[in-house]
Structures are given as structure tokens and as C-alpha cells.
Amino acid sequence: MTFKGKTHVVGDHIDTDAIIPARFLVTADTAELGKNCFEGLEEGWVKRVTPGDILVAGENFGCGSSREHAPLAIIGAGMPVVLAKSYARIFYRNAFNMGLLLLELGDDIGRIKDGDELEIDVAAGKIANLTSGETIGFNPVPKFMMDMLSGGGLVEYVKRKVAQ
């Protein structure tokens, strides 16, 4: 699994209400949620995103209330992967359950700037920053979680397992 895209950097302690405010939770449609991604942070934020772009966050990303809509909004905005210093644990699990890949980089997150072009090779555990020329390593995602992601999240993963 590889990803290539331009980065969009947000700060520390971005909560789920900033990702997708409660007023937009009238639907579970991923595309509709994506249209309002980060409206709690900045009106119209999502308009600068091109499908395939990469979200980069600071510490404790996804804190606050547990809402499955938050990772769905990020997916719907066209960002298939999030890099962060750290994640709120409930958001981390919800993201994988919904089919959103999260990579935790610790302090190395500071080596990535807004607008950098990245190429991520998940299997190799490497991020090539095509803008700066740097390479950042990360811990591999466990196989069962990658299997869950490749199938579109937990529900689809379980359906496949039951069918087998």
C-alpha cells in the first residue's frame, strides 16, 4: 500500500468536533461528511484538499467525543491517510474500524511541513519527503489491521471472515 500527496498540517489537540462539528452529523454518508471536514477548525478548510492529499497533525489528534463520523469525514474529504505525533486512543481505533489509515510518528512529525509532497510506503515503513529529500521511518502497522483497512474497515473485514 502506497500513498502520494500534498500535506495539510493541523495543530495539537484537534478534537472530533473540529474535524466534523455536531451540526453536520445528520448523515453517515462519507462524501457528505467530507464536504464539511474541519469546518470546526476553519470555514472552507476542505476546499484546498485534492483527493489523495495527506493530513498531518500534532499531538493527541482526534481527542474529544467518540464519533465514527470524524474518520469518515477525513476519508470523504479525500485524505486516505493521517500522520500525527500521537492520537487519542478511541479515535485511533475508530479510524481503523472505519477504514482510515493512521501512522504515529512521534517527534518526527515536526520534519513535515504544510504543502510538502510525500510518498508513503506502508509495507516498507518509510515516508519519502519529496520536497525536503528526507526519509522518515515508522513502525509497521500490524497485519490484521492492514487486512481490516484493505477491506474497507471492521464491518467489511468481519463479513469476509464470516463468509469464509
Image (tube, helix red, strand yellow):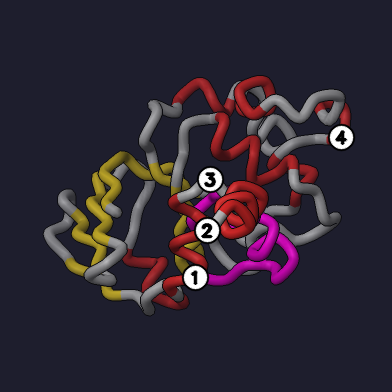
Decide whether residue 94 is among the magenta residues.
yes
Report the residue marked by disc 1.
Answer: 144
Give the percent coordinates (x, y) of residue 11: 58, 55
Report the residue marked by disc 4.
Answer: 22
- Report which quarter residue 136 is drawn in: bottom left
Residue 3 visible, this angle: yes
What secondary structure is found at the residue carrying circle 2? helix
**Of the residues under marks 2 and 4, which one precedes in the sequence?**
4
Question: Considering the image in quadrants, where does the C terminus appear?
Answer: bottom right
Q: CA distance from mark 3 to mark 1?
A: 13 Å
Report the residue marked by disc 3.
Answer: 152
Amino acid marked by disc 1? Phe
Q: Residues within 10 Å of mark 3 (few under 14, many from 20)?
A: some
Residues rendered magenta in the picture:
85-101
Q: Residue at x 74, y 40 (%)?
A: 69
Question: Considering the image in quadrants, where does the N terminus appear?
Answer: bottom left
Report the residue marked by disc 2.
Answer: 148
Amino acid marked by disc 4? Ala
In the rendered structure, the answer to whether residue 66 lies left or right of residue 111 reads right
Q: CA distance from mark 3 to mark 2?
A: 7 Å
Q: Nearer the viewer, residue 122 or 132?
A: 122
